[in-house]
């Protein structure tokens, strides 16, 4: 018996897209490692990622 796991279309890889990471770093003026942590934590939830970056700057 073979079980096939189907991932949702919204599921995105961990931060491997340099363009997205660089854009997020510039947009929020935060450190690259902080951006990696935030994007890996919040995945495809852009609003949550933006809020986390905003809280980090305070």
Image (cartoon, helix red, strand yellow):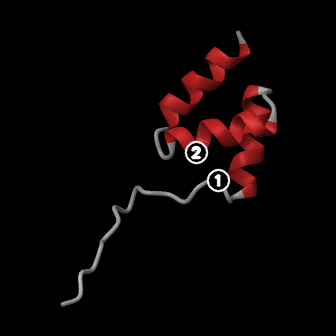
User: In the orientation shown, which residue stands out farthest toward the top?
Assistant: 58
Q: Quadrant of residue 10?
A: bottom left
On-image quarter of the C terminus: top right
Q: Is residue 51 above or below residue 39?
A: above
Residue at the image position 50 percent from the left and 57 percent from the top? 12
Are the residues at dot 2 and dot 1 in contact (C-beta closer than 8 Å)? yes
* Secondary structure beneath label 2: helix
On-image quarter of the N terminus: bottom left
Q: Is residue 9 above or below residue 46?
A: below
Q: Residues within 10 Å of mark 1 (few under 14, many from 20)?
A: some
Residue 51 location (% of width, % of height): 55, 22
Q: Residues within 10 Å of mark 2 (few under 14, many from 20)?
A: some
- Residue 40's disc is 2
Q: Which residue is mark 1?
A: 15
User: In the orientation shown, which residue stands out farthest toward the front?
Assistant: 1
Residue 34 location (% of width, % of height): 72, 33
Q: Is residue 7 above or below residue 27?
A: below
Residue 39 location (% of width, % of height): 60, 41
Residue at the image position 68 percent from the left and 59 percent from the top? 16
Residue at the image position 35 percent from the left and 66 percent from the top? 7
Residue 24 location (% of width, % of height): 70, 38
Q: Please indicate whether residue 57 sits to the left or right of residue 50 in the image.
A: right
User: In the orientation shown, which residue stands out farthest toward the bottom?
Assistant: 1
């Amino acid at each position: 018996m073979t079980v096939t796991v189907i991932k949702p279309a919204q599921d995105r890889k961990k931060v491997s897209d340099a363009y997205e990471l660089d854009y997020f770093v510039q947009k929020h003026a935060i450190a690259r490692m902080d951006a990696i942590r935030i994007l890996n934590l919040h995945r495809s939830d852009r609003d949550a990622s933006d809020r986390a970056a905003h809280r980090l700057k305070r």
